[in-house]
Image (cartoon, rainbow, N blue to C red):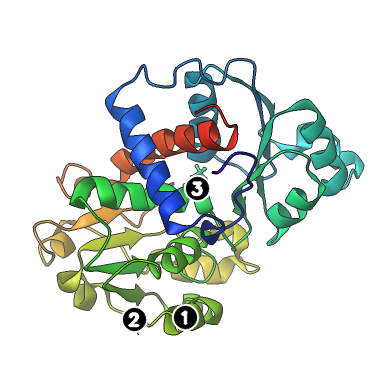
Amino acid sequence: MLKGRSLIEPADFSLEETDGLFALAEKIESDEQYLRESCRGKLLATLFFEPSTRTRLSFEAAMLRLGGSCLGFADPGSSSAVKGESLADTVRMAASYADAIVMRNPKEGAALLASNYSAVPVINAGDGGHHHPTQTLTDLLTIRRLRGDIKNITVGFCGDLKFGRTVHSLAKALARYEKITIIFISPEELIIPEYITRHLQKHNIEFTETRSLEEAIPQLDVLYMTRVQKERFFNEEDYIRLKDTYVLNKEKMALSKNDLIILHPLPRVNEIAVEVDGDPRAAYFKQAKYGMYVRMALLASILGVL
Ligand code: CP
């Protein structure tokens, strides 16, 4: 039962609970009328202290499609945070107006802190470079929809693996599935953090690290491209030097398997050439749409309307 539960990192829900969400999301996708109006009278607060297109809009679309309503802010500059109000007080207020809170914040640990002060469930929509659990649900659902299951695959993560919270969340979550091999592809300065590799070792997940996308790509069943995260760099020169390290283009696609799945949490900048969008293996826009269905399943579950 997910009713009343917060989601701060993917492991907060068991594998069985996560599978249940995927099954529900698939049902919602196949029957647009299913659960329509189930959240009538419920309110979702969306507190975005950092920019977002997909996460905020897909949560709002999800709540509206379920018949509920949304309130909140997309820019902390329009909230009393600019007057110095603490996160704890902001969350207390939102919890007194709404039935659930979705929050994105630049500080690692902010979502966990929020859940300690909230009387209603808190969903982490990204806390700094730490976690993004609903993106992980989106990513896993996309793999399941396109392959039929989530096992026996080699997954490559490419780009900014140091700051990429979607990478951290998905890599940890994959450790719960069978026969997963991971290849981390990044420049030396943006390697995957040790707390993730320690987690993989603890769960006996085979992984390697490389600097070369060309070398790795022929082995992959799933390629998870990521943007170099400008907003997390202290030094613009370093960002400019690293931002175009990897560009997935037609030449590199020619080296890959015919059934490769290309994912990207989006937004993309230059790391996937637009010429790749028309390739049947490019699944990133489909992935963003699955995000809305899985968020509908999540909201219906935690609000207890099933
Ligand atoms: N994937 C993702 O988090 O996108 P947004 O930053 O647009 O929400």
Is ligand 1 closer than 8 angstroms to the Cβ of mark 2? no
Could you say which quadrant of the image residue 223 lies in?
bottom left
Q: For the residue labelled by badge 2, is the local secondary structure a helix, a strand or a loop?
A: strand
- Find residue 226 and report its image quarter: bottom left
Q: Return the mark for residue 186.
A: none
Residue 295 appears at what percent x and percent y?
48, 37
Q: Is residue 139 visible?
A: yes
Mark closest to the chain's N terminus, 2 or 1: 1
Q: Is residue 164 left or right of residue 85?
A: left
Q: Which mark is residue 207?
A: 2
Residues at badges 2 and 1 in contact (C-beta under 8 Å)?
A: yes
- Whole-angstrom CA distance, mark 3 to mark 1, is 21 Å
Q: CA distance from mark 3 to mark 2?
A: 24 Å
Kind of residue at badge 2: Phe
**Quarter in which the N terminus is drawn:** top right
Say few, some or many: other residues with alpha carbon within 10 Å of mark 1 (under 14 / 14 to 19 / 20 or more): some
> Which residue in the structure is indicated by mark 3?
134
Residue for badge 1:
197
Residue 267 at x, y = what percent?
44, 46
Q: Residue at x 51, y 19 (%)?
A: 38
- The picture places residue 54, in percent across and down from the top left corner, at 48, 38
The mark nearer the N terminus, 3 or 1, is 3
Element class at badge 3: helix
Vertical relation: 177 (above or below) 121: below
Q: Nearer the viewer, residue 94 or 24?
A: 24
Asked if the residue at tag 2 contacts the one at tag 3, i.e. Cβ–Cβ closer than 8 Å, the answer is no
Residue 210 appears in view: no
Q: Amino acid at mark 3?
A: Thr
